[in-house]
Image (spheres, grey):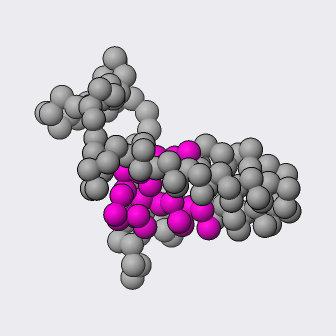
Amino acid sequence: GSRFPFFGRGGAGSGAAAGPSGPAPKKGGGQTKSNGSGAAAGPSGPAPKREGRETKSAGGQDPSKAAEPLFADMKQKIDAARRESLDVRKKVFKELQRHLHPDKNLQNPEAAKLAFQALMELRGPFLSP
């Protein structure tokens, strides 16, 4: 058995044979099911983001302000490793991913989410050979 039960359900790499007995494909038209909540994306696209909403972190501070020290630390480490070999840059990036992941920053997950998203935007330029 797998530690992650959702990995063994007939998807790619699970060893299940694709075909008539396999799961129905999720792509294509004909998706007529509705959950009745009206939240599904329709012809008008996905639901709009709530930009005007102020979200406070666990400490009562604005997440973007709480993320500033995380941004500064991330920028310092990336700048220091920018001229290093690709292997070193990959290690630095992986370390930053672990450090900034919202699941590892339980004291302020919203700030960590913002910093992690900024890090992921830098992935291509930072890791290009």
Measured as percent of width and height from the top left, residue 28 is found at: 43, 33
* Residue 70 visible to an observer of this rendering: yes
Whether residue 49 is in magenta: the answer is no
Question: Front-most of 17 and 101?
Answer: 101
What is the number of callouts on the image?
Answer: 0
Residue that appears at 71% across and 68% down: 91
- Residue furthest to the top in view is 44
Question: Front-most of 95 and 23?
Answer: 95
Residue 62 picture quarter? top left
Question: Front-most of 7 and 88?
Answer: 88
Q: Which part of the image, by quadrant, shows the N terminus?
A: bottom left
Measured as percent of width and height from the top left, residue 21 is found at: 39, 58
Measured as percent of width and height from the top left, residue 83 is found at: 85, 56
**In the rendered image of this protein, does residue 31 appear above or below residue 73?**
above
Q: Which residues are magenta?
A: 95-118
Residue that appears at 42% across and 59% down: 102
Question: Front-most of 48 and 92?
Answer: 92
* Residue 115 visible to an observer of this rendering: no
Measured as percent of width and height from the top left, residue 38 is found at: 18, 28
